[in-house]
Each structure stands twice: as C-alpha cells, then as structure tokens.
Amino acid sequence: MARFDFHGLTVETSSAFPVDPGALLLAALPPAPSPAAAGSLPDLAIRIAPATPAELTQRLPGPDAFVYGASRLRIAGDTVELAWPGTRFTITGPRVEGLVDRRAMAQPEGAELVGHGPLLMALAVALRSLGCYHLHAAALVLPQGPTLLVPALSGAGKSTLATALVLAGAGFLGDDTLFVRRDGPSVRLLALPRDFHLTGRSAEALGLTDRLDPILLTPAGKGRFDAFARFGDRFRAEAPAPDFILLPRISGEPATRLLPAMPSAALGALLESSALVATRGLPGGAAHLPVLASMANGATALHAELGLDLLADPRATAGRVIAQLGALQATAAGPPG
Amino acid sequence: MAGLQPSDDVILTELKDGTGVLLHVGTKFYYTLNPTGVLAWKLIAAGGATSAAAVAAAIADRYPEAEPGAVGADVAALLAELTREGLLAPAA
C-alpha cells in the first residue's frame, strides 16, 4: 500500500500484483502521511486485484454512456464502470476497484499500460466527486509569469509546442494530462506529473532523441520523454487559471503565427479536451461546464498556427511565441503605474 | 415553423463577449452561437417566442436598425439548422 498527496488530497493505492499500477501512475506525487501516522481514511482509494476473463465480462446493465477507443463506460446509480480490454474498473464516489486480467499485467510494461491507461481514466472519474476535472491539455508557466493552457486533441502539435516552450525557458505542469479545480471565483490548474509523449520526428527536432524511451505507449506511436529528468527545476505542481489559451494547429506554413480567437473557440477546445463533460450521470457533472466556461472567459484565446519553423528551430520559435505573449500580457495590463 | 423548444439534452453556456456555446450531451457535439443566436435561443428557452416569426419580431424590436426581412430570413435559417441538429424540437 502507498499513499500520495494529490494537491491536498490523500490518495491511497494498493494492489494484489507484485507491481501496483496505481503506484506507477502516482509515483511522481509527493508522499502522503502513512496510514498509521495519519490515522484516517484516505480521500481517494484505489484497489486493484486479479480477475479471470469471465469476471471481466460481468458488466453493469444498460447501455454504454461513453465510448472512447476500446473503453466502455456505464453508469448505474452511484456506480460508474469502466471496461477496457483486460480490465474492469468500478468507481463509486472516490473509491476505485479494479479487476485486471493477469495476462494483461504479464505483458511487457503491463503495469505501466494499466496505470496510464484505464486506471488514469478511472482516477479521472473518481476525482470528479472531489471537485477535480480532467483536461487533456498542456499547461505552462511563461518566464514573465502568465499561465498558458494548450487544450487540443492528439496530433495538433500540443506536446511539440509545449516541449519547445520549456526549452525556451517556460515552466511546465504537463504536456497532456491536467486537472482543474474550482478556486473561489476562479479555477486552479493541478498537475499529475508524468512523462511527456513525443513522436520520433519531434524528439529529433527538439534535440531529445537520446532521451526518448522507445517503448510505445500511445496509439499515435509516441515515445516517453522524462521531462522531470531533463527539466525538473521547471516543474510547477499548480498554477492559477490560464492567462492565455492557445489553440494549436499544424499549418504547414513557413512561420508560426498567433492569431486572435473567440472565447467560444476556446470553450469549444476545452469541451473537446474534456471527454467526460458531456456524459450525464457522472459525479460532479453540473459543476464541470462552469469550470471550463470560467477559464474560457478569463483567458485571452489565440489560434497557434504552428509553422515549419517549430521543427526547424524549436527553441527560437518558442522564444518568439513567449515574447509575443509577453507583449500581449503587458498591453492587457496597461502602462505601469 | 412553429412551436419550438430546446431539447432537454442541450446546455447553453454564455461567454463574456456575448457569444455562446450549445453542448448536446446526447451527441456530444457542440455548436457556437453569435450574440444574436444566443438571444434567439434564450427567447425560445424562456418560452416567450417559440416560432421563427416571433423570434424574428423580438430581435427586430431589439435591433431596430436591422432590416426586418433580413432578420426574418436569418432567424428562419438559424432555427432550421438548430432543429436539423436536434438542438430544438417541436414543443410538446
């Protein structure tokens, strides 16, 4: 059993397997007080046990409420079930019970794949009952101070842009996994620290080929890049609501450009990056959309038309993006008083 | 077109610039509305105007500088599209 501190919440994970997928997923979080020392129940608990294939086919009744790739999510009363090949997780409030086929865990990197696949999604469901909402987005803190959010689907250039910005001096919360939580009238960005994921082409352009783990974890064929080993001093566990929301798109033009975007475009991108927001019956459902709207309303939205220069000279291109955002921030703040 | 109401599966989120986003939790699609579209949606949702003609008349009242014929055509096209996408449905 292990306990981790997720932004003030104690998350306890245990597994009957020799390697606990939960401990792998949460490994970069700071430890929480031990159960004996704390003498209290955790805020969120994960239990993972072996199951036979027959046990994995026992599903909750009713239709699928949400389908994402090979995963199927069903809801019955207060229980949410997430079925993924070789695994079945049931989530009741902040309690996650996982059943995993021994054969899935016996595969190379099996515990990693379970941890960063179905368990991450189950954790995202469970954290909703504690007011934390998953967002598929990169989050960065620019050297001048502003917070930058880059919500986008896979393949839009999010990780390449995020890594280039880090190379150019930005701090980072992550390149694709983020949680947001209501913080008074605003929201707060919460990191779940884990590896970046880069294609071989992007890693080569960024000069990080030798640091790319060739074991593939994503359907897009991206490899893992340990950003903490390379840029650990730039990691930020939390950040205030974004000052800028960048909507990336690979343009194929020579130069990267930032263009004004409507708040509705920002909200649209946030919706696309929040897979569970449109699923009825999940815990925390009513509060999710206002959190996204708060970010769309509070930030300056910009289209980031990513040009060929991002791969030709990522550090200089990201430096220009940082300078442009800094100038926009200074304009918005007005002249110093 | 007469007697429309928002689908129970649709949520409007208004934004600071007057635009809005409709989220259909059944299809998971979202749709953006300009400020006039937001006004039209809110008129229908409030039950004050449930036909294209009534919505157009209310918007023409709000924007007297607009040409009434153009307002009527734009509103009819908008409501037809919202109905086609399942965002509006015939009132019960």
Image: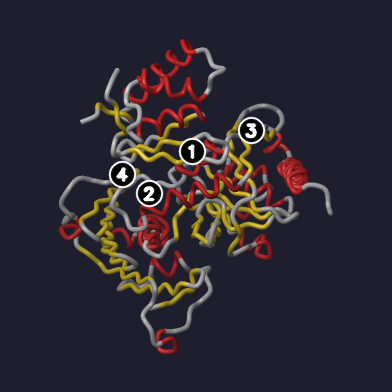
Q: Amino acid at mark 4?
A: Val
Q: Earlier in the sequence, mark 4 or mark 1?
A: 4
Q: Are marks 3 and 2 in contact (CB under 8 Å)?
A: no
Q: Residue at x 65, y 64 (%)?
A: A232
Q: Earlier in the sequence, mark 1 or mark 3?
A: 1
Q: Secondary structure at mark 2?
A: loop
Please give the residue where the numbered disc 2 appears in the rendered image.
Answer: A276
State whether residue B2 is above or below residue A332.
Answer: above
Q: Position of residue A163 (x, y in %)?
A: 64, 49
Please give the residue where the numbered disc 3 appears in the rendered image.
Answer: A305
Q: Earlier in the sequence, mark 3 or mark 4?
A: 4
Please give the residue where the numbered disc 1 appears in the rendered image.
Answer: A268
Q: Are marks 4 and 1 in contact (CB under 8 Å)?
A: no
Q: Do discs 3 and 4 belong to a common subunit?
A: yes
Q: In which quadrant will I find the C terminus of chain A? A: bottom right
* Res A23 → quadrant: bottom left
